[in-house]
Image: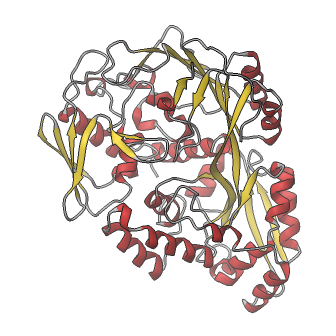
Amino acid sequence: MKKRTLGGIGAALVSVLVLSGCAGGAETASHDDALRLGTMTVPTSLDPIDAIGSGLPFFQAVYDTLLHRTPDGAYEPMLAEEWSYDDTQTVLTLTLRNDVTFDDGTAFDAAAAKANLDRFRDGGGPNAAYLAGIEVAVVDDTHVTLTLPQPDPGLLFSLSDSAGLMANPSKFDTDDALVTTPDGTGPFVLDSEETAIGTTWSYDRREDYWGDEPDFSTLTISVFDNENAMVNGLKTGQLDSALLQVADQQLAAEQDANLTLQDVLFDFQGVLLFDRDGVITPALADPKVRQALNYAIDRETLLQVVRDGRGEITSQVWGVDTQGYDEALDGYYGYDPDKAAELLEDAGYEDGFELVLPRLTTIVTDNIATALQTDLAAVGVTLTWADIDSATALQQIFVDKEFSGMVMNMGQSSDDWIVYTSLIAPGTFNFFGTSDDTVQELASEARALPTDESADLYTQMNEHIVEQAWFLPFYRMTYKLVTVAGIEAQPQSGMAVPSIYNYSLTD
């Protein structure tokens, strides 16, 4: 595995660890035109190759994407004014704006778009697979074509995400130039003098920005190592907005009438069962065993104990913003230890078996560890936690393949095909390559159809995955998007945190 790819998995894990109704009712107050955001996500660099997950706002400030993804997940023009597929769904043509320049005055054109797409595809970043196998060709200054080896229903999502970020190609030949000195076409420019890499990133509004002028003349994104500090910052006016994951800190923010809170459902917590072919733990090859594990977990109690009830129990990995989401599947596996024991007996494991999972204490807290051990022991399954060091965890889990699964917090994409490619298809989180005829047939059909015609196929795939118990989800976690008076923020479909474009002044 390439070093950058392994680093990408690490970035994804960091992102999901710290991130993946209104309170108060105070009158809206006036606010200056500075936007100050708090986060616990630290970007590894400002090079678009490294952009991922909840770190995207750092990049969106300085780099526009080819397509804009609206808060509800729809696609709108950005650097690409128009786009269309051919009849085979394998050639995408983009019509680009002709009035955009990079920070140094260089024109953005089709050659620049190709250079960025090629570099992202070949750069080995965490999301490089978004563009795998795609060939980019320049038609003229304002048109490029992307030729796909096979249809990819998630491509538009990718072009509105990290793969669509456009940087100045003149910086590509200088090693690590974009890591700390970004050069894009975005609404802000990095203020290097006010930026302290690793702590605070400061941006100034770009005066000659081609698009709508942001409400804010300055943008500051500050990194914290705990949510208590962010809540204090919100209460004292040092921050204008932050996403809170921890139940105690959400409660603290709710008690301040000057703060507004909105629910964000993005991450689910549960066990990703990698070893569905029984390579390490033979019992897991039997669907009845995996189903038994699902029936054995008391999700309601777990949610109450771990998160003070702040979330929604679920048995599916498809998120609420996807076409394949089925509310009925949230309660597919009710708590039924008798049913679990019966299934284990039917599968020939009436005496139980041992399941060894890695324990990263940043995810698996004491109450989660104890609850899962207790629930599984009640049906005869011995859950053994293997304490592993965070420095070697990625190697042990994803490269050496030492474990049959792990407890994770995973973001739920708003795009069904992204759900399929990231969790279901062979790859990073399906590294044993599990598949079956039903999954392959449904994926093949969905791949060939326009996105708006494939909802039923994704629903069928979701139902099949739940019935076959590919995963052991516990619940979707309710996060809180907090803003101060005078600032409005819209949650972003497909992201834990809002896009930069989703913030505005209310007065």
Question: Does residue 475 appear left or right of residue 118 in this picture?
Answer: right
Question: Does residue 166 appear left or right of residue 85 in this picture?
Answer: right
Q: Where residue 459 sits: x, y (%)?
A: 51, 71
Q: Nearer the viewer, residue 369 or 336?
A: 336
Q: Residue furthest left?
A: 140
Q: Is residue 263 above or below residue 100?
A: below
Question: Does residue 353 appear left or right of residue 478 in this picture?
Answer: right
Q: Is residue 432 above or below residue 82?
A: below
Task: Say which quarter of the image contains residue 88.
Answer: bottom left
How many labels, in total?
0
Q: Where residue 44 sits: x, y (%)?
A: 52, 32
Question: Does residue 383 appear in the picture of this structure?
Answer: yes
Q: What residue sits 57% from the left and 54% below the top?
A: 412
Q: Where residue 123 sits: x, y (%)?
A: 36, 41
User: On the rendered image, what quadrant is the C terminus found in?
Assistant: top right
Q: What residue sits 50% from the left and 44% below the top?
A: 8
Q: What residue sits 77% from the left and 75% below the top?
A: 295
Task: Say which quarter of the image contains residue 38.
Answer: top right
Q: Where residue 325 sits: x, y (%)?
A: 56, 64
